[in-house]
Amino acid sequence: MDYPLQLTVNGVAVKRIVEPQIRLLDFLREDLGLTGSKEGCGTGDCGACTVLIDDEPHHSCLTLAVEAEGAAVTTVEGLVTDDKLNEVQSAFVSAGATQCGICTPGFVVMATAYLRDNPNPTDDELRMGVAGNLCRCTGYDTIMTALHSVIDGKVELIEVAPEPQELVPEPEGEL
Amino acid sequence: MAKVVERPQEKTALRVANKPVSRIDGVENVTGATKFGADFSLPGMLWGAILRSPHAHARIRNIEYAKALEAPGVVTVATAADFAEDVVEPTSRPHNVFAGDFALFLGEPVAAIAAVTKEDAEAALELIEVDYEPLPHVLDPEDAMKPDAPAIRHGDGGDIDRTEMSFHSSVASSAEDLDESGNVSSQVQFSRGDIEEGLAEADVVKEGRFTAAMVHQTYLEPHAALAHYTPSGDMKMWVTSQGQFYVRDTVARLLKLPAHKVIVQGTAIGGGFGGKMTLLAPIPAILSKKARRPVKVVWSRSEELVAANPAPYSVIDVKIGAKRDGTLTALQGRVIMDTGAYPGSPMSTATMLLGSCYVFPNMELEGFEVLTNKVSVGAYRAPGAPNSAHAVENVMNWVAQALGMDPVEFRLRNAIKEGDRWPNGQPLPDVGGVEVLEAIKNHQVWNTPLEQGSNGKPRGRGMAIGCWSGGAGGSAATIKLEADGSFSVLVGTINLTGSTTSIAQVAAEELRVPLEYVSVHQGDTNEAPYGPVAGGSQVTYTVSLSAAAAAHEVLRQMKGIAAQRLGADVDDIEFDDGKMWAQGDPERYVTYRRISDEAVGSTNGPIIGTGHGKPARGNPGFAGTIADVEVDTETGLVTILNLVGVQDAGFAINPLSVEGQIQGGTIQGVGYALLEEIVYDEDGSVRNPGLLDYRLPTAADVPNVDTVIVEKHNPYGWKGTRIVGEPSIVPPGAAITSAISDALGIPLHNMPLTPERIVMALRDARSNGRSNGEPTS
């Protein structure tokens, strides 16, 4: 049986007919082409598929699309505002907290929500707060560095696709 | 930031190399824009699903799939019959896409279906009727070596293809394979001097038997591949793999297509660590060739944990003798490595590496690769080396303790140096083993006594070193000067570790422009010059040479045009910051932009240069770990208090990236030491095929890694560069297990030291009434 689904994804109203057993992750990736959310396990153990549903982090692999009826869903693609990365994204880039990048979308979505609710965690609290997001490349060092720089308010927001700078002016006149 | 030691003088003039640079693909990663294997789709695309053997060992009498073909959405089915001429059991895994007459492990692919939706494909799998005759199976390699064990090889065996293992190590194992029989698929021996004499002249001899579990690389991106066999006979593929040319060659061979008609684009790769080569790619390729439509296959996590190519379980015996003054006299070792259902384990490398860090005048090493009815193993970051180091380094610490010597001083006295020989007889170039040990000796953590905590939980300290030979493959790179004076670099290697950023740094350094003026593009196998597999830590090591050579060729052409324009001699042209001038007259310059314009209209034509590179030889990388731990003796839970990772990078092109490699490899070593193990049931099924029960280190399990980058110049690398990716995973398992031994006062022999194993080891030690004796756990 098909289900008429209405929700908002990254600020855009979406109306689709879906099968009720379709996972939110597949709806986002296959139906909407938002492939930023990743499937690392499909069982809620790795966190790579984390999205915000009405501002709360959820595993989109364990959520049916129809459960998001009427909700506002934010994926990693929706974190950029005014052509600037958000604080967590910017900190990840600057600290070298993204290596292969497959865990990064889920990690930045989770950390964005966690730090919004817990702006001043201890290192232990922070580590526990993001322990549901696995990363195999970094050993978490640079991720912790990035998140601490957010907590300390030391992040410079990074512009997406900045204008190129001219390297060297042409000399006056002909040579 | 990492502490960097041993800085040569010439570095002061560097522009972007040897400076920490965040990954140039970082913004793509954090916005979800990076496209990984599963993110590619095509119009009209089918989905593939794989039918796997439910038996650990069975004869396949017949496969009947007519009913499956009639199921909704199903377009085609593929089996071993589609590769009939290539199925020779057992050669290596890449030759056996599907089980042929025999299924050799539970989870081995038997057939695959392509259908309109993934659900259609999966639903139709159960309509394939396979007539299995279950056969006796064996899961433990020591059982498999017994004369009455079930034979895993059928027929004459055929030639064993060891291509994949050779990517990871440029070191030849010179010992001949001996006496292949039964389930022992390969043997090696290395000997030197007289082992009996060596042991006789020792004042202290220590020995132990060590096991390391089968662990999975656990790249967080499962295997994925999309294939499109076009009407013109091109096989276009998008594959997450560490080596797109290796995928191309494998698919071309299996499907009998010319290499240039198999066009593979390696996608962004969500981790590989040695485990992502060609396992999956031939399946969507054959399905697409049969269906004449694009086919995508994406593995689930449980398929990964059951049927990919994990790192091997091993049993290693090591006996080491030393004189009272700390001079080593003898090393005896035996490696039994469980290769699973197909040959191709890193057994010979692991055996040789037993004698890779120290000078042993007398040595006897032997290794056995043993077939079992488990998934066949593959490479995992310094394949086999963590297993070896676990055994040797723990015994080294016991010998040091028995001699009353500091373990670092004991190692320094015997450390292998330039000109010393590895067990295979190969003399070493100037390696950084001594420098790594010195860095440990001078480290603040090592020089601060470990105090016992107030909670009653015992604490201990351990250290270990290890090394990895690494690869040194040939590569080429192409650089173009673009219209505005910027440059584009074309390579055929996969950006596994951030190598793209390092290559951009090399090009920018040589061309003397800011990093923003260089972009690096990974072309497909028809566009890009050849590059080796991203394995053996070799990509940055070799492509830095070819990219520098390409830059030199581009500069040569540019100087010719600048010289003409300036009326100067070509040898007098100097350049920096996007401009060229004649020596002594920097005010009168031509810009790179102008040179590009001129070149297009000149007889030179557009400026493009290709460079070739291959390091003259591999040069092993050394790493060391210090670990401080606290053990809860009631629950067996280990808390790591301090973790120091030291590594010789030769010349760190991007220290941020090198540091990230050391941290990541060290924490993977924590997984080996404490957490990770693929557990088999008696029927040959994997008991923990998910990430809840196959437990990776989380952020809450580990401390920060205090990294030290040592830079011992390597004459064969660009500006002294050495291999980087792998060595850091080698010593942590040994250092952590040694630290736990130190805390508990009992020798420990098995990785991972899960809470259960620690509690059992303590119970055994108590019941045996000894706290520091022979093997217990």
Image (cartoon, rainbow, N blue to C red):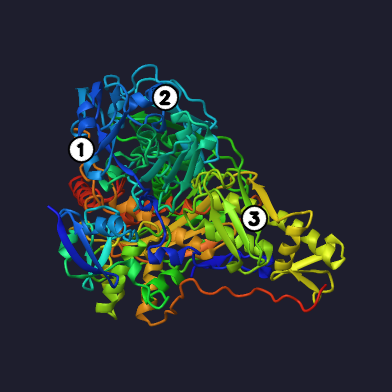
Q: Amino acid at mark 1?
A: Pro
The Cα–Cα distance between marks 1 and 3, rounded to whole angstroms, is 50 Å
Label 2: element kind? helix
Q: Residues within 10 Å of mark 1 (few under 14, many from 20)?
A: some
From the top left corner, tell me how far across and down residue B505 is, in percent. Answer: 59, 62
- In front: label 1 or label 3: 1
Q: Nearer the viewer, residue B457 or B292?
A: B292
> Where does label 3 land, which residue?
B479
Label 3: element kind? strand
Q: Is residue B603 left or right of residue A56?
A: right
Q: Residue furthest bottom?
A: A153
The Cα–Cα distance between marks 3 and 2, rounded to whole angstroms, is 39 Å
From the top left corner, tell me how far across and down residue A2 is, in percent. Answer: 14, 54
Q: Is residue B758 left or right of residue B502?
A: left
Q: Residues within 10 Å of mark 2 (few under 14, many from 20)?
A: some
Q: Amino acid at mark 2?
A: Asp
Q: Residues within 10 Å of mark 3 (few under 14, many from 20)?
A: many
Say if mark 3 contacts mark 2, CB within 8 Å. Answer: no
Q: Residue furthest top?
A: B156
Q: Nearer the viewer, residue B210 or B329?
A: B210
